[in-house]
Amino acid sequence: MLRFRNIDVYESIRAHPAGGFTQQASDSPVEVDRVLFDSRPHYLVSLKSTGVVFINPNEIYSFVRVRGDSMNRAKPTPIVGGDYVLLRIADRPEDGQIVAAVFKEDFPEASQSGLKRKARDGLYSESTTPYDIVPLENVERYVGEVIAIAKPLRE
């Protein structure tokens, strides 16, 4: 679930020339547990231990569609092709986080970017397919940390 802070929720708005909002209904955050991509519903899975992701209006976020299998055994939730990951844009992610990274041009990885788990000594895949560890010196830049996964609802 995503929880948005600092979004005002008003009880109503007047639909006449004077306009205006009536009193604010709640200080509670807005909560979202479903999103649509290409008109298909997806449910959200938080990677935070609280089960809730707080969206900070002072930070930047992006959803990215996943291709490949580099994190299909990730814990606590596998990330598979067709999922969307919610990135908190960060150029200095913490160790232990799943990150989106761009690799240097001369790095002999089949893809020049990917999702990996960051550790002190490199970026690791958690996959059924064996992938080499990406040494940190082969990271061109970090795009962000994965904070949630949007998985398609099964029909």
Image (cartoon, rainbow, N blue to C red):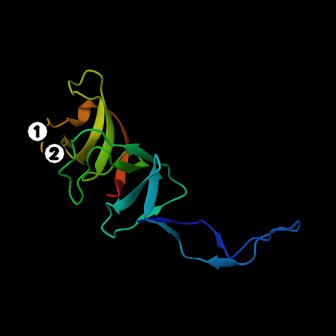
Q: Are marks 2 and 1 in contact (CB under 8 Å)?
A: yes
Q: Is residue 110 left or right of residue 52?
A: left
Q: Residue at x 36, y 45 (%)?
A: 92
Mark 2 crowd level (few <14, some 14–19, many ≥20, 10 Å Cα) = some
Image-based side of 29 in relation to 132, left or right: right
Residue position for label 1: 130
Mark 1 surroundings within 10 Å by alpha-carbon count, few (fewer than 14), some (14 through 19), many (20 or more): few
Q: Residue at x 20, y 35 (%)?
A: 135
* Image coords of residue 76 (percent x, y): 22, 60
- Asked if residue 90 lies left or right of residue 138, the reply is right
Residue 78 at x, y percent in the picture:
23, 54
Q: Is residue 91 visible?
A: no
- Residue 111 shows which numbered tag? none
Q: Name, please, the residue furthest toward the right.
A: 17
| Front residue of 8 and 41 | 41
Foreground of the two, 1 or 57: 1
Give x and y (percent) for residue 121.
18, 42
- Who's the residue at 34% across and 58% down the image? 155
Task: Tell me the amino acid under the disc marked 2.
Answer: Ser
Circle 2 residue: 127
Disc tally is 2
